[in-house]
Amino acid sequence: VVIDLEFGDLMEEKEKKSMAYQLGICYSANCKAVVPAQIHVTGLGSGMGDVVRKVCSGVEHWAVHMSDETYLESPALAERKTNLVYLTADSEHELEDFKDDEVYIIGGIVDRNRYKNLTLNKANEQGIRHARLPIRDHLKMSGTHVLTVNQTLDIIHAQLELRDWDQAMDRAVPMRK
Ligand code: SAH
């Protein structure tokens, strides 16, 4: 899983802090996950690096690949470009399941969805595949179907463990009653 932090310029200070805080939640969730993901945090060069170092104490000891480079600049990821799948709520493709040989990118941005299609357009411009989680089929959420970064990772963890979207969604994003 790649957490793409290239969006530093599009966030206000408060949103950047909130993004860094979510990154901390992602890290501890991954440490506790029954089936953890291999996590790459990329794009720290675009304004998020300092915030992350400030908000996430101990980040220098995290067992995570952290890079100032973007995922396309990172040789290990760029050479797997055809296996990259950008997860985005705006995609017309619905993800069937996670596959071992694919790398899933989560957009590391807190924007209360004011940037519609931001990650969809990015994936299209870069010629990267994209998919949305099968949320609408599984969760009759009253509000939005756009999740936060850590909710998205929670769903990945739950699905990798349970291999059942209904159960995974239920556990990761309990329905509001
Ligand atoms: N306007 C932003 C929204 C960011 S939400 C955008 O254009 O992406 C943070 C990230 O969580 C998204 O970039 C995406 O990677 C992931 N995400 C949220 N809801 C999702 C969904 N329904 N399906 C797939 N990925 C989702």
Image (cartoon, rainbow, N blue to C red):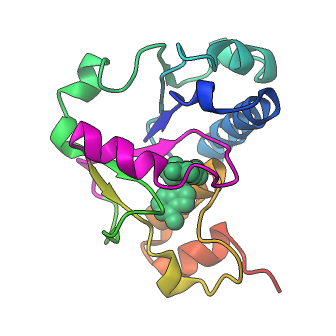
Q: Position of residue 84 (x, y in %)?
A: 27, 43
Q: Quadrant of residue 40?
A: top left
Residue 98 sits above or below residue 141 on the image: above
Q: Position of residue 29 (x, y in %)?
A: 66, 46
Front residue of 149 and 98: 149
Does the rendering let one see residue 93?
Answer: yes
**Left or right: where does residue 101 sit relative to residue 17?**
left
The N terminus, quarter of image: top left
Residue 78 sits above or below residue 139 on the image: above
- Residue at 28%, 28% (x, y): give it: 77
Q: Position of residue 151 (x, y in %)?
A: 64, 57
- Residue at 72%, 41% (x, y): give it: 25
Residue 102 on the magenta span: yes
Number of labels in the image equals 0
Residue 90 sits above or below residue 148 on the image: below
Q: Position of residue 138 (x, y in %)?
A: 52, 84
**Left or right: where does residue 160 sit relative to residue 126?**
right
The C terminus, quarter of image: bottom right
Residue 38 on the magenta span: no
Front residue of 87 and 163: 87
Front residue of 133 and 39: 133
Q: Quadrant of residue 130?
A: bottom left
Does the rendering let one see residue 35?
Answer: no
- Residue at 59%, 43% (x, y): give it: 30
Question: What range is drawn magenta here?
Answer: 99-128
- Residue at 48%, 22% (x, y): give it: 43
